[in-house]
Every structure is written in structure tokens, then in C-alpha cells.
């Protein structure tokens, strides 16, 4: 098998695994918030569980960057898929909050409807090995298009599962959901067994040295600090928190929230199609910043909407813009580091996002418990505007390598 054929095959299996995984995350993130509210848990308690899950995700992301040179990316990905399956299995068998918290602590659960753990940085680094030149933004756009669409389908599936008989009040509204989550974990693990040694990149060749950031350390640390601020704001409005707020504020249930979040995620997925063309036309950094700013203003307006239809419409409009910075952010990070430092860079930048975002759901839960006003939405929007302006100020004069395919980029 030629190197090009192997790379294309690896890319397909990486996308399959990511799609299945994010379908499961979309399913659980919508389902579990309403289920726990109906079971009598307070928003503060639910927010605390979400915080544990996000913190664990960031921690596992950091650990992946430190140990994958010894274990290997493929073996580590396979093991993480099995942990995801085990987490779903535990939630299916035992429907207690303590078990759910333990699963969250393993990083096997996502309240945001998307990746928060070690699989994301490993996917980013592995995908980078299958691309050359200006393919990176296009590949990351395709990756995010797929994962967001899969999460949208998971959210929509919640409405269908709601028609089935319930086996217990916890563990994601029904054990059908958690059982399906476990099956998805098994499929993810099996997909990763199909990867070739090419996805290891420089990790195996360079031994332990590749995990230490060297030339790219200053820029990665600056990006990490800014990404942490963005994640702190994003944690205030993770999908699970949105579900709780819409449920409490407007009295809507899963039959309405599932389709709404399907549309929201599909709107975000559609926006990924524009990421690569915009990045080629205007540059990676301008695309990151100037599509993100208006989305954050719309986020504030969601909280001020007097009715559910208007709040839903504003949320959908916001989703059309809010995710354009994701593939460009990933491509930017991969472009400014040496190939042998990519997993370490992805691990570091992802690691801070988890702990930073982990603080926020607890705060959001407390705010929602005290008031039906959308305070988390307002705070998130304001903080994110500050992040966008800071990112532009700090990096607009940093030039990317010509191989990044962004000669027009003022960065």
C-alpha cells in the first residue's frame, strides 16, 4: 500500500471514529440534563457533575501528550474507546448519580455534546500526518463538519428515545441512551484498530523528546492562555447547561429540545464548509476573529429574548458563526509548531480548555438555580469578545510558514 493510499485510509477511519463518538456525546449531553432535572437534581448539582467531566477531559488530554510516545497513538486511542464503552456500560447497569460522577471523572462523558478529552488532541495530531500544505484547514473543516453533524444527529435521536419505555430516571433519561453510548464506544475502539503506523508520525521515532515543546513553546503557551479564556466562557454555556436553562426558563422538554439542538448543531456544521474558503481568502487569523465576534453578541441576545421562539432563532443564528474559528484554530496551532511537536502542542492547548471550562458549569448551575435570567449567556458573550480582541492584538503580526497555505494571512 502506498503512503498516499495509507494516509487516505487512515483519514477515513479517524473520521468514522470521530463521527460515532460525537453522535454518542450529542445524545447524552441533551438527554442527561433534563433527566436529572426531572429526577429532582438542582441545576447546581448538575453543573458540578458537568464540571467534573470537563476537568477530567482536559486532564486526560494533557496525559495523552505525555505518554503517547511510549504507548503509541493507535494503542492509546483504542484504549480510550474501551473506556468510553465501559462508562456507558456502567451507566446502563447502575443508574445512580455517584456512578455518573465516577464515569465523568474518567473522562468518558461529555456534557458539551462534543469532544473534551484525550481523543481530540490525538485525532488532531493523527490527521496532521495525513495532510500536506494547505490541506490542513480543509481537513480540519471536514473533521469538524462531520463531528458536529454527528452530534446533531445524537441530539435528534433523544426525541426518538423519549418514546421508548424508561428503565430508570437517571443515567441519561433512559438506559437505552446509555446502552447505545456503550455500543458507540466499542465501535470507536474497533475503528482505531484499523489505523496504520503512519499516524504515529514522529512520536515513535523521536522517543520521549517529541513530547517536549521547544522552538514553538512561547507561541503555544500564549495560544494556550487565550484558548483557556475562551474555554472558560464556553463552559458557561455547554450544551447540557443550555438544555437546563431552556427547560427551566420556557418549560420545554426533550421533544422540543432535541430537534432544536439538532438544528443548532447542523447550523454549526454548515458553517464549517465556509472555514477553508474564508481562510484562503482572508487568512486564518482574521477568519478566527471576525466570525467569532458577531456570534458572541448573538449569544448575549439569547439571554435577553422574551420568548422561546426568539431565543431559539437567535441561538441558531449564533451557531452559523460560532464554530468557524474551530478548524482554523486547529490548523493555526498545527501550522506554527514543528511536526514532531504537534501532539504535544495539541495536548497542551486542549488540556487547558478542559480545566478552564470545568470551572464554569458549576458557576452557571449556581446562577441558574438563583435566577431564570440567562446570566451565563451574558457572561460568556462578554468574555468571548475580550478573547477575540486579545487574540487579534497578540497574533496579528505573527506570520505563518508558507506551507500553511495562508500567504494572505496578516498573522
Image (cartoon, grey):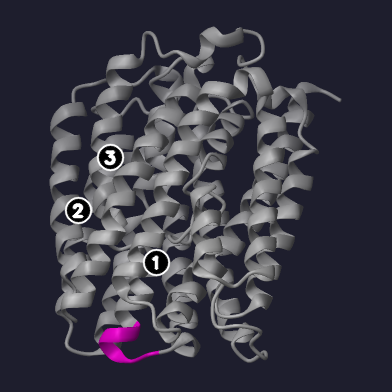
| Rendered-image quadrant of the C terminus | top left
Q: Earlier in the sequence, mark 2 or mark 1?
A: 1
Of the two numbered discs 2 and 1 in the rendering, the one whose residue sits closer to the viewer: 1
Crowding near the residue tagged with mark 3, few <14, some 14–19, many ≥20 C-alpha atoms within 10 Å: many
Image height check: is 357 above or below 42? Answer: above
226 part of magenta stretch: no
Instruction: Determine the residue positioned at 38% across, 76% down.
Output: 243
Distance from Cα at disc 2 to Cα at disc 3: 17 Å
Q: Which residue is mark 3?
A: 228
Distance from Cα at disc 2 to Cα at disc 1: 20 Å
Q: Which mark is residue 293?
A: 2
Image height check: is 232 above or below 42? Answer: above
Q: Which mark is residue 239?
A: 1
Q: Horizontal placement of 309 versus 141: left or right? A: left
Looking at the rendered structure, the secondary structure element under dot 3 is: helix
Q: In the image, which residues are magenta? A: 247-252
Amino acid at each position: 500500500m502506498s503512503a498516499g493510499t495509507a494516509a487516505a485510509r487512515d483519514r477515513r477511519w479517524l473520521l468514522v471514529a470521530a463521527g460515532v463518538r460525537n453522535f454518542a456525546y450529542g445524545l447524552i449531553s441533551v438527554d442527561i440534563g433534563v433527566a436529572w432535572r426531572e429526577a429532582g437534581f438542582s441545576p447546581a448539582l448538575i453543573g458540578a457533575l458537568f464540571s467534573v467531566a470537563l476537568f477530567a477531559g482536559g486532564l486526560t488530554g494533557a496525559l495523552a501528550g505525555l505518554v503517547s510516545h511510549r504507548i503509541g497513538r493507535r494503542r492509546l486511542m483504542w484504549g480510550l474507546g474501551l473506556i468510553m464503552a465501559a462508562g456507558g456500560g456502567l451507566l446502563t447497569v447502575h443508574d445512580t448519580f455517584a456512578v455518573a460522577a465516577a464515569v465523568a471523572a474518567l473522562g468518558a462523558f461529555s456534557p458539551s455534546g462534543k469532544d473534551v478529552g484525550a481523543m481530540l488532541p490525538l485525532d488532531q495530531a493523527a490527521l496532521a500526518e495525513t495532510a500536506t500544505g494547505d490541506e490542513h484547514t480543509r481537513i480540519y473543516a471536514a473533521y469538524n463538519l462531520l463531528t458536529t453533524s454527528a452530534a446533531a444527529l445524537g441530539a435528534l435521536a433523544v426525541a426518538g428515545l423519549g418514546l421508548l419505555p424508561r428503565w430508570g430516571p437517571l443515567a441519561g433519561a433512559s438506559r437505552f441512551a446509555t446502552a447505545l453510548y456503550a455500543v458507540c464506544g466499542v465501535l470507536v475502539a474497533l475503528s482505531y484498530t484499523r489505523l496504520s503506523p503512519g499516524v504515529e508520525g514522529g512520536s515513535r521515532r523521536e522517543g520521549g523528546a517529541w513530547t517536549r515543546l521547544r522552538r514553538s513553546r512561547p507561541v503555544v503557551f500564549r495560544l494556550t492562555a487565550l484558548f483557556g479564556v475562551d474555554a472558560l466562557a464556553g463552559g458557561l454555556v455547554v450544551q447540557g447547561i443550555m438544555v437546563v436553562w431552556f427547560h427551566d426558563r420556557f418549560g420545554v422538554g426533550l421533544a422540543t429540545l432535541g430537534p432544536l439542538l439538532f438544528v443548532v448543531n447542523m447550523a454549526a456544521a454548515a458553517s464549517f464548509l465556509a472555514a477553508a474558503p474564508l481562510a484562503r481568502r482572508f487568512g486564518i487569523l482574521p477568519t478566527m476573529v471576525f466570525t467569532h465576534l458577531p456570534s458572541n453578541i448573538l449569544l448575549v441576545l439569547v439571554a435577553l429574548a422574551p420568548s422561546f421562539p426568539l431565543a431559539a432563532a437567535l441561538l441558531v443564528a449564533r451557531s452559523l458563526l460560532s464554530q468557524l474559528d474551530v478548524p482554523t484554530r486547529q490548523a493555526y496551532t498545527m501550522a506554527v509548531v514543528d511536526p514532531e511537536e504537534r501532539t504535544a502542542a495539541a495536548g497542551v492547548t486542549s488540556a487547558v480548555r478542559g480545566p478552564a471550562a470545568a470551572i464554569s458549569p458549576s458557576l452557571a448551575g449556581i446562577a441558574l438555580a438563583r435566577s431564570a435570567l440567562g446570566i451565563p449567556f451574558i457572561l460568556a458573550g462578554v468574555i468571548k469578545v475580550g478573547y477575540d480582541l486579545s487574540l487579534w492584538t497578540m497574533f496579528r503580526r505573527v506570520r505563518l510558514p508558507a506551507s500553511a497555505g495562508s500567504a494572505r494571512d496578516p498573522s
